[in-house]
Image (cartoon, rainbow, N blue to C red):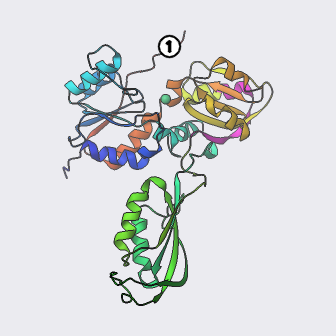
C-alpha cells in the first residue's frame, strides 16, 4: 500500500497526544510555516529549530520539522534575516519546509516531557506534580430510557467519559421527566399543548473542557428531543492527566553523590549545578524539564528529596533551605529526549515516510 500522508495528518496525531488547548497562554505551539495540506516527504525531530536544523532537513529530504520550542515565539514584524529566527523562517519557506512546534502542551500532558525525564531516571509510582485547573467539565442530561445507549455511544465517541485507563464511563439513574409542549412545539413524545411525562434517565459524564463543543454537538445530534435538557459545569477537580512537573520514587534511596552520579549517567550530563542536602537520603524525586524554578515550593510540599530542573537562579537555590537537593541540569539537557516522544508517536502511526532525530546539537551553551 502506498498511502500518502499530509503534514496535517501528522499534526492531528501529535495534537491527540498533546492537545493545543493545554499550552500556556504565552506560548505559540502549532504550525509555524508551511501548508498542512502538503504531502509529507520526511520528518526531522528537534528540540530547537535553527538554520542548521533546516539545512539538515534539506539534506535528509524532509519537508517537516517538528520542534519542542517554537522558533516564532514573539511577534515578527519583518522577515529580513536580521536575527536567527528570521533567517530560519526564510530558509524554511524558501525550501518548502513546514515547521511545527509542540511546546508547553507537551510539558502539560501526563505522558509528555516530564514523563520522559521520569522514564530516563527510572522513577516509580509517578504522578503529576501540579494539576492544570479548570480543564474538566461535567455534563448531566436527561434522555428517554430507550434512547440512552445510543446517545451515550455518540458522546463517548466524541470524547466523553474517559478517566485514566477507563473509557466509556458514565453514571445514570432513572426517573420521570415532565414537560408541557407549547402549541408551536414539535415534540418527539407527546402532543402540543398537552402535559407529558416520560420515563427518562439522568446521565452524567466527565470530559476534558476543550472537547465541549464536539460533545455537545454529538449530544444534540443523537438525542431524540427537540429541546435537550442538560446541565454543563466547569469543574474544580484536579486533572490527573494535565499539569506541569512530575514526582516519583527511585527504586532505592541514594546518598547525595550517588544520586548526582546517577543523574549524570542517565541524563548524559557533564555538569550539574546543585543545592546540597548533606547526609539526607534521596528517594522521592520531582522533575520539570526546562525552566522549572516556579515549582520548587510544589516539589517541597509533595515531599521531594530532590528536584531536577533547569534555569534556576542564584537566589532560588536558597529556597531549598538545605532540605531539597535542587539539581539544575541545563535546559537543553533536561529536554533533549523530548524528540523521542515525537519519534515514538509519529512512527507508531505512520510507516510510509522517514522520521529522523536531528543530529544537530542546538544547545547554545557550552561548558568548559
Ligand atoms: Zn524548554
**Is 171 above or below relative to 319?**
below
Can residue 319 be seen by looking at this rendering?
yes
Q: Is residue 268 left or right of residue 149?
A: right
Q: Horizontal and vertical percent for residue 82? A: 31, 13
Q: Residue 249 appears in which quarter of the rendering?
A: top right
Where residue 49 appears, as percent x and y from the top left, is: 36, 26
How far across and how far down the image is residue 143, in percent? 45, 78
> Regarding mark 1 in the picture, which secondary structure is present there?
loop
User: Along the line of sight, which residue is nearer the eye, 42 or 147?
Assistant: 147
Q: Is residue 18 visible?
A: no
Q: Which residue is found at the position 40% from the left and 83% from the top?
A: 181
Magenta part of the chain:
244-261
Along the viewing direction, whichever of 359 and 49 lies nearer the viewer: 49
Determine if the magenta segment contains residue 41: no
Residue bearing mark 1:
366
Compare residues 162 and 315 and report the one nearer the observer: 315
Question: In the figure, 339 relative to 205: above or below?
Answer: above
For the point 24% across and 33% down, the residue is 63
In the image, what residue occupies the spot 53% across and 70% down? 204
Q: Which residue is painted at 23% across and 40% down in the image?
A: 40
Amino acid at each position: 500500500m502506498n498511502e500518502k500522508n499530509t503534514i496535517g495528518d501528522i499534526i492531528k496525531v501529535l495534537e491527540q497526544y498533546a492537545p493545543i488547548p493545554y499550552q500556556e497562554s504565552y506560548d505559540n505551539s502549532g504550525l509555524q510555516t508551511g501548508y498542512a495540506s502538503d504531502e509529507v516527504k520526511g520528518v526531522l525531530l528537534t528540540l530547537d529549530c535553527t538554520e542548521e536544523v533546516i539545512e539538515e532537513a534539506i539534506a535528509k529530504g524532509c519537508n517537516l520539522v517538528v520542534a519542542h520550542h517554537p522558533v516564532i515565539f514573539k511577534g515578527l514584524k519583518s522577515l529580513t534575516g536580521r536575527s536567527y529566527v528570521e533567517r530560519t523562517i526564510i530558509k524554511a519557506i524558501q525550501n518548502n519546509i513546514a515547521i511545527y512546534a509542540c511546546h508547553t502542551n507537551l510539558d502539560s500532558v501526563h505522558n509528555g516531557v516530564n514523563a520522559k525525564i521520569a522514564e530516563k531516571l527510572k522513577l516509580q509510582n509517578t504522578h503529576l506534580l501540579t494539576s492544570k485547573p479548570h480543564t474538566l467539565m461535567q455534563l448531566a442530561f436527561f434522555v428517554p430510557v430507550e434512547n440512552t445507549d445510543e446517545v451515550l455511544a455518540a458522546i463517548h465517541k466524541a470524547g466523553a467519559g474517559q478517566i485514566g485507563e477507563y473509557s466509556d464511563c458514565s453514571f445514570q439513574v432513572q426517573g420521570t421527566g415532565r414537560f408541557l409542549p407549547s402549541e408551536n412545539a414539535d415534540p418527539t413524545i407527546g402532543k402540543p399543548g398537552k402535559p407529558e411525562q416520560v420515563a427518562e434517565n439522568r446521565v452524567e459524564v466527565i470530559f476534558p473542557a476543550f472537547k465541549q463543543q464536539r460533545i455537545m454537538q454529538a449530544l444534540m445530534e443523537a438525542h431524540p428531543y427537540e429541546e435537550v435538557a442538560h446541565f454543563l459545569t466547569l469543574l474544580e477537580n484536579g486533572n490527573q492527566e494535565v499539569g506541569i512537573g512530575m514526582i516519583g520514587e527511585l527504586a532505592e534511596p541514594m546518598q547525595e553523590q550517588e544520586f548526582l552520579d546517577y543523574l549524570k549517567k542517565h541524563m548524559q550530563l557533564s555538569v550539574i549545578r546543585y543545592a546540597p542536602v548533606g547526609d539526607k537520603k534521596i528517594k522521592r524525586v520531582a522533575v520539570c524539564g526546562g525552566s522549572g524554578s516556579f515549582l520548587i515550593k510544589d516539589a517541597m510540599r509533595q515531599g521531594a528529596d530532590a528536584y531536577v530542573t533547569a534555569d534556576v537562579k542564584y537566589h532560588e537555590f536558597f529556597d531549598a533551605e538545605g532540605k531539597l537537593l535542587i539539581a539544575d541540569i541545563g535546559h537543553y539537557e533536561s529536554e533533549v529526549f523530548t524528540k523521542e516522544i515525537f519519534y515514538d508517536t509519529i512512527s507508531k502511526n505512520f510507516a510510509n515516510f522517514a522520521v529522523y532525530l536531528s543530529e544537530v546539537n542546538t544547545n547554545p551553551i557550552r561548558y568548559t
